[in-house]
Structures are given as C-alpha cells and as structure tokens.
Amino acid sequence: MSANGKTPLEQAKANWDMYYMLTQELLKFIDQNDIDQFLELEKQRNTVVERMKALPETEDYRKTEECQALVAKIKPLDMQIIYKARAWLNKSRKQNASVHAYDLQGVSGLGSILNKKY
C-alpha cells in the first residue's frame, strides 16, 4: 500500500485516469485559445507522466484491457491536441512576423518621427 492507501496497481490506474482527464481538459482549453491554462495543464500532465514512469506497476496496468480501452480514447485526443497546438503556434508565429514587419523604428527616419510625442 502507498501513503494514500492505494495498492501500486490502483495507483497506476489512478495515474492513467488523471492523464485521461488532463488530456480532455487540454483539448478544451486549446479550443478556447486559453494558452496560459493549456500550458499549466500540460505541466500537470507531465508530472503525472513522471509518476507513471516511476511506478513499475504502470506497465502491468498498461497490459490490462481496461487500460487499452483508455489508451484508445486518449490517442485521438492527443492527435487533436498536437494538431491544434501546431496550428496555434504557426498562427502565433505569423502574427509575430506581421507585427515585426510594421516595426519602423531603426528602419527609417520616418519611424522615429511617427513615434514622437509633441
């Protein structure tokens, strides 16, 4: 038994359940363009992954039908998250490039004239 009263196999199941829940939440927040919350949840999910790696029983649980069914639910969600995260990143890069394209300071004297306060 662990400190929380669960057997290692129960803890492995709890970790996978938490991973699934966090994956669902990640998708929800990227759909809402709430990138700050998305990044916070990604940190939490990485912590769960570290716990999973540290628990040898994770591999035993992974072999169960229950876990295989959960993995089958998680995989398409992960693919959506990856696709949407890449799309957001590309959009962000384009917006950043557009902003820098209009950065007139240092390019010509006109930029310094337009930015002066009279």
Image (cartoon, helix red, strand yellow):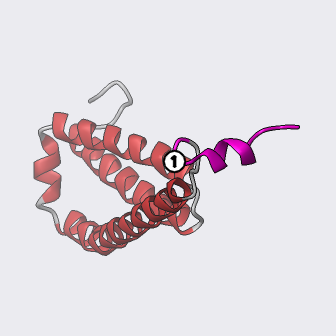
Residue 13 coordinates in the image, percent (x, y): 29, 51
Q: Residues within 10 Å of mark 1 (few under 14, many from 20)?
A: few
Residue 24 in picture, x, y percent from top left? 45, 64
- The residue segment tinted magenta is 106-118
Q: Viewed as shown, does residue 86 lie left or right of 59?
A: right
Would you name the residue on which mark 1 appears?
107
- Residue 6 lies, in percent from the top left, at 32, 37
Q: From the viewer's perspective, is residue 24 above or below residue 61?
A: below
Q: State the residue at coordinates (35%, 48%).
A: 14
* Displayed quadrant of residue 21: bottom left
Regarding mark 1 in the picture, which secondary structure is present there?
loop
| 114 sits left or right of 79 in the view | right
Where is the N terminus found, in terms of image quarters?
Answer: top left
> Closer to the camera, 79 or 110?
110
Residue lying farthest top? 3
Q: How many marks?
A: 1
Quick one: 51 or 96, which is closer to the camera? 96
Viewer-proximal residue among 101 and 52? 101
State which quadrant residue 32 falls in.
Answer: bottom right
Assign the C terminus to one quadrant of the image: top right
